[in-house]
Amino acid sequence: MDLRRLLLAAAAVAVVASPAVAAEGRGLTAKDLATLDRVSDIRASPDGRYAIYDLRSTDWTADRGVHALWIVDLAAKTPEPRRLAISEGGIGSARWSPDGQSIYFLSGRSGSAQVWRTTPQGATATQVTQLPLDIGAFRLSPDGKTLVVGLAVYPDCPTLQCTLDRAAKPKTPTGQVFDKLFVRHWDQWADGTRNHLFALALGPDGVATGAPVEITPGLDADIPTKPFGGDDDFTVTPDNKSVVFSARIAGTSEPWSTNFDLFQAPLTGAAKPVNLTADNLAWDAAPAFSPDGSKLAWLAMKRPGFESDRFGIMVRDLKSGATRELAPQWDRSAGGLKWSADGKTLYATAADVGQTRLYAFDAARGGTPVALTGPGHVGEYDVSKTGLVYDRDDLAGPAQAYSLPLKAKAPIQLTHVDADKLAGVAMGEAEQFSFPGWNGETVHGYVVKPANYQPGRTYPVAFLIHGGPQGSFGNLFHYRWNAQTYAGHGYAVVMIDFHGSTGYGQGFTDAISHHWGDRPLEDLQKGWSAALTKYPFLDGDRACALGGSYGGFMVNWIAGNWNGPWKCLVNHDGIFDNRMMGYSTEELWFSEWENGGTPWANPQGYEQFNPVNHVAQWTKPELVIHSQRDYRIPVEQGLATFDALQRKGVPSQLLYFPNENHWVLKPQNLVQWHDTVFSWLDTWTAAAAK
C-alpha cells in the first residue's frame, strides 16, 4: 500500500466532521439511547470495492438487539448502503472470502450458531456448516479451502458427539465439584468445556465437507479466550498448513496469570502446538502474518500479571527468526493490528489524550507512527488494496462508517445511521480542558453543556467517574455511561481522566496501581475545582458524583473521604470491601496487581484504600446499583454497601438486576437504570435548590 499517499489524505483532514449539534430541540433520552441503531464490525472486500458492516437495531418488545448485515459499494459516486441479510436467529462476524466473491457469517437461523455464506449481490444464503455444537468464531484459510472454527468441547472427548451427549445428560443430583479456579468467570459458571479449534475442508461450492478435525486436542486452554475472545485470537498461516493462536495454558494458575503465548499447530491436529513466545511471561496476542508470509506481527506486554500494561507491536522475520519491537519509544498501547495489502505498513488503533485514533507504522523502519484520524473514537477498521474503512463516534453522536481511500483528500462518510431518530435532538456541546493534577502533572477532562444550554444560567452537575480503572471517559459515544443522556436531562457533565487513565502514556496509567484512593482522588478534587473556575454555568451547590466498577469504588471512597461537594452519590457495581474483593473476584491477577500481592501476603495493600474502613463518615444520600450475574465485583459488595447505608440511616436505595452482569445490556433495563438514576439526581439536586 502506498503509505505516502494515504498519509497525505489523512493530513488533509485533521478533524473528521462530527454530527451536527442541534442548537434547539429536545435532549437525548434513555429510550433514544437504548433504541439507536449501532454500526460495528466493518470489513472491506480484498479489492476495496465493497464494505460490509453489522447494524444492530432494537426489538423493544422482545427486549433484545437484532443484527443485520449491510453492504455499501465504495466505487459508487454516492455510496448507498443496503441490507444484505438479517436473521431472527442472529447474524454477525461477517468475513470476506479471500477472492472477495463470497461473504461468510455466523447465524442461528438453523437453530444453532453455524457458518453461512452469501454474495455481495445478496444471493440466498447457503449453510456452510452443520455441526452439532454452536460455533463461537471462525477463520478462512488464505486459499479459501479450509474453515477453522472455535467450539466449546470437553477436552477429553474424542468426538463432538461425546460433548453433545455429556452436555445433554440429566444433571441429577445437581451438585458440582470443582478442583481448581475459574469456578465462574464474568457472568458464567464453569461447565467443564474449553474453546478449541477445529478445521473443516471446504468444497468447490464453499460448503464444508467431511468431519471436523480437532487442531488442539486435549489442550488445557481456551481458543478463543473467554469471555471476550474472537477471531483475532487465531489466524491461518500463509501456506494454509497450520494455525497460530494466542492462549493461556490453564493449569491451576489461570485466574492469576496473564501469560498468554502464541502457539502454532498443524491443521491436521497431528502434532502438539509449539510455543512461539515462551520467553515472554506476559501477554502475547493478536497474531497477524504479512501478506507475503515472510513476517509475523503480534501485540505483546512485558509485565506478567498486569492486564493494563502497554501492548507493543512485535515483528518476527520468519526466515531468520529475528524479532524486534516496532516503534518501542511510542508510549501508547496498540490494538487491532493489521497489515497493508502490500506488507509495507502496519496499522493499529490506540487511545490518545481522550481520543482513539487509527495509526500507520512503517513496517520496515518503525519510527513514530502517523495518526490517520482526528478527534473522536475509532472502533473497528479494515484494510484493502485501495485504502481503509472504519467506524467512528464521538461525544456528539453514535458511530458512522467511513472510508479513507488512498487517493482521497479526506475520509468519506458512508452511513448516516440514526439520522431520522436524532432529527430534532439537541446534543450538549463538549469541551476538553486540562489542569495540573497529582504531582503537578497535566490531567485532562471533558465538560459537556446541557443540551439546551442558555448563557447566563447555571445547571446542576453530574460528575461522572470512569471504571477500569485503566480506562477513559473520552471523546466517545458510550452506550452505558453516555454524557448526552445527562445533558438531555438538563445536567451539565464533568468527566476527569485521572491518573490511571489510558491514552496519556504508560507511566500515567501505571500511577494508579497501589494508589487507588490518593492520586486519582487528588485529580478528581483538582479537576472539580478547575471546572468550577473555568465554567461558570456549573452549579457547584447542586452536584452529584456517579461511577461504575472502579468508579463505584471511588464513589464509596468519596463517601468517606470527600463527601463535602456532593448532594448525592450513585454507585454502580462498586467495591465496598477491598479485602473481600481480593478473595471473591474471578480474575485474581487484577486485584493482586493493583493491591501489591494476595490479601494474606500484603493485607495492608488491601486496607490502605478500603471503603469499608470509612463507613462512619458516610452521610450523603447514595443510590446503589448491582446485578446478580456480576462475578467481577460480586453482588454482595452492593448489598453490603446498601446494608451499611440503611443501618446508618443515610437516605439510600438499591436497584437490583437479577439478569444482568457487570454491565446493563437489556434495552428495557437500560431505560429503568436511567429513570432510577435521574429520579435520584433530581430529588437531591432539587432539594439543594430550595
Image (cartoon, rainbow, N blue to C red):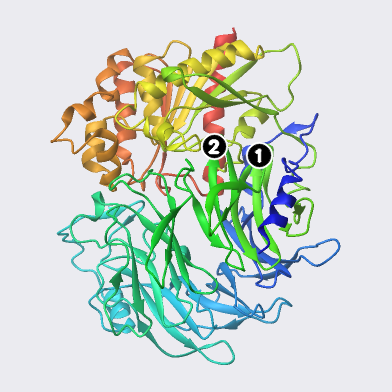
Q: Secondary structure at mark 2?
A: loop
Residue 667: percent from left, percent from top: 56, 48
Q: Dot 1, how many residues are within 10 Å of its Cα: few (below 14), some (14-19), or many (20+)?
A: many
- How many numbered discs? 2
What number is the disc on residue 491? none
Where disc 1 sits, the SS reads: loop
Residue on which disc 2 sits = 481
Q: Which residue extends farthest right?
A: 77
Between residues 680 and 93, which one lies in front from this camera angle? 93
Q: Which residue is mark 1?
A: 375
483 relative to 43, above or below: above
Tell whether 108 sits left or right of 79: left
Q: Viewed as shown, does residue 410 lie left or right of 595?
A: right
The quadrant holding residue 491 is: top right
Q: Quadrant of the N terminus?
A: bottom right
Residue 64 x, y percent position in the rendering = 56, 56
Give amino acid for label 2. Answer: Trp
Gap in angstroms between the C-alphas marked 1 and 2: 19 Å
| Residue found 80% across the figure and 67% down from its top | 75
Q: In the figure, is residue 260 to the left or right of 26?
A: left
Q: Is residue 441 visible?
A: yes
Which mark's residue is nearer the viewer, 1 or 2? 1
Question: Where the C terminus falls, by quadrant?
Answer: top right
- Residue appearing at x 61%, y 37% in the figure: 475
Which residue is found at the position 48% from the left and 77% from the top? 238
Q: Is residue 403 above or below residue 371?
A: below
Q: Residue at x 38, y 22 (%)?
A: 519
Name which of mark 1 and mark 2 comes first in the sequence. Answer: 1
